[in-house]
Every structure is written in C-alpha cells, then in structure tokens.
Amino acid sequence: MLIARLIADAENLSAKIDTARAEMEQGGVRLASATMLDFCDRTMQIGSPDGNEGVLRAALDAHFSPSDGLVTDHEPIVPKVFISDMDSTMIGQECIDELADFAGLKEKIADITERAMQGELDFESALRERVGLLAGLRETAVDDCLAERIRPMPGAKTLVETLKKLGCRTVLVTGGFHHFADPIAAMLGFEHVVGNRLGVADGKLTGDLAGPVVDSSVKKATLLAEIAAIQSAGTFGPDAFVPSLATGDGANDIPMLEASTYGIAYHAKPKARLAANGWIDRGDLTDVLRLLGIDEQAWVRS
C-alpha cells in the first residue's frame, strides 16, 4: 500500500489525475483513491494498493511538476525527531560562500561548494580546501556575514516551533560551522546543534578545522542516535517505531534522508531529491507541515 500526498497547481486537476492514473496503471500501479484532505484544501492524498514507489513518483513528476509531495507506506504522522541541514535548507545561503566574499574568493569557493553538493567531489576534501582558502580572514567577518547576508528560509521558524510544540525533538546538523549554526539555531528554535568548528587564532581564521568533520555519515549517525535515545528512554520501548523527519538539499544529506521515516528534499540537487521519499519543489517549509497532515490551526506562526 502506498500513500502519496501532493501539493500542486489545482488547474485542470481532475484531468491531470485521470491522465496520471492511466500512466500509473500501465506501469503496474493502480490508483485506488484521490481526494483533497479535509484539513488542508491544498493537499491531495492519493492511495494505491500497489508498492512501486518509482512508478508512482514518475507519474506525479510527469503530470504535476512543480509540486511538493511525500510518498510513504502509511498515513504520515507527527515525527518524534526532526533533523535538518542548514545551508540552502533552513537558510537561503551557503554560509561558507558568503563568508568567502569577505575575502574576495566567493566565485572560487562557491564553485567547489556546488560541486560538493552535487556529489561530484569528496565532501571532507572539498570542505578542507575551502576552509584553507579562508586563512587569515578576521573572525569578526563571521558576525558581519551573519548580519548582512544570512536569512532564514520562508517557513523555517514555523516548521521548527510547530514540531517542538507537538513534542518533536529538533536538531540542526550541518557540514557548516558552529560560528553560524549556533545563532541560526537559536533564531529558529532548534534544541541541539551538530556542526564543524573553524580554527581561530589571534582573532583570525587559521584555515584549519578544530575537531572532527561533520559529514554525511555523522548526519545519519546523529539521526539514529536521537531515535535510539527516545527508545532507550522507555516511553516507546527499545524496538518501538519512532517516526523521524529529515530535510536537506545536497548529496551529503542523502544518508540521513534515506534513514528517516520522512526524508524531504528541499529545492534539492537531483541526487538528493531522488534519494528522498518527499520533496519540496514549489512551496516553502510550511508545506512540510501540510504533507505531514498538521492542521494550520496548530501551527506556531513566526
């Protein structure tokens, strides 16, 4: 059994559903139902008794793009753990690229960032190379960058605060840096932060990292550790199902997107979008709440 939730352009929706139905049935996926959810007239729920997620998603992409969606084997519920990437997910920028602009190196560093997020470069090597280029930059440039360049994604604070209100543990995990992540987490309402640390000496960046690198494996491990902590607390039991949510946009987010119950790729790179079972291509982060079935009356508005 598959359940898909979809937010898309409502124009000619009935005709599009009929066309998609025919295509899915040709691929061996029957469409059992397609109804608008009562609590959110922007969200359609599609049911199929078959289990071929690939065929279903291909049909949705072909007939409803751009869309926001989620495909699962059960009706989505409120997660108990939410773990999110930061750059280009919770905020609209790549912090290291913006910081590099203060050193006159944005174009060079941004190219490396893009290739790493596309999965074309080894993440740790690319990170160390970019950090090395920043050697000698004054530490106060971080504060200037935060104030002048860094802005939250639309809906980010509403998403985090609403999930917290509903009893979800919220964690910001980033391949970026605590210098940025700590104030951003405080601004958006995250309870915990995992990130890299920039080396600093005499008020300037050393070009090195202080401590181990937070990469894709650490992101996944953080998610699994949070789930295990809830299970070990005894509320659910050691083998109980703990629903989890992850959001991200780049190749280094793929392991945590795949490991989560609801992995939602936010305006993501192709590899990350393909790995996730949910996607936001048209709306903002509040559409994550809609896809999970959380009534707008329960939202914490920022």
Image: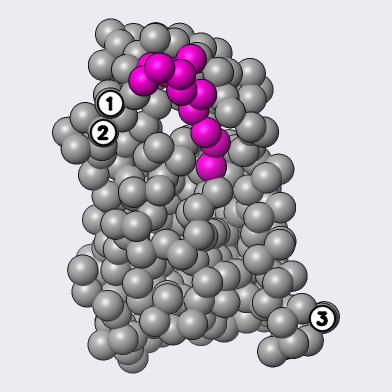
- The mark found on residue 238 in the picture is 3
Q: Residue at x 30, y 42 (%)?
A: 92
Give the side of residue 177 with respect to residue 8, left or right: right
Spot the residue most to the right: 239
In space, the residues marked 2 and 1 are separated at their CA atoms by 5 Å
Q: Does residue 60 appear in the picture of this structure?
A: no
Residue at 62% over, 81% down: 74
Front-most of 260 and 109? 109
Q: Amino acid at mark 3?
A: Pro
Cα–Cα gap, marks 3 and 1: 46 Å
Whichever of callouts 3 and 1 sits on the residue coming sooner in the sequence is 1
Q: Is residue 144 magenta?
A: no
Residue 67 lies, with reference to residue 5, above or below; the image says: above
What element does badge 2 sit on?
A: helix
> Looking at the rendering, in which quadrant would you find the C terminus?
bottom left
Residue underneath mark 2: 143
| Residue at the farthest left position | 148
- Circle 1: residue type: Thr
Q: Residues within 10 Å of mark 3 (few under 14, many from 20)?
A: some
Disc sitting over residue 140 in the figure: 1
Residue 165 placed where, x, y %? 39, 81
Magenta stretch, residue numbers: 195-206
Reply yes or no: does residue 198 show up in magenta.
yes
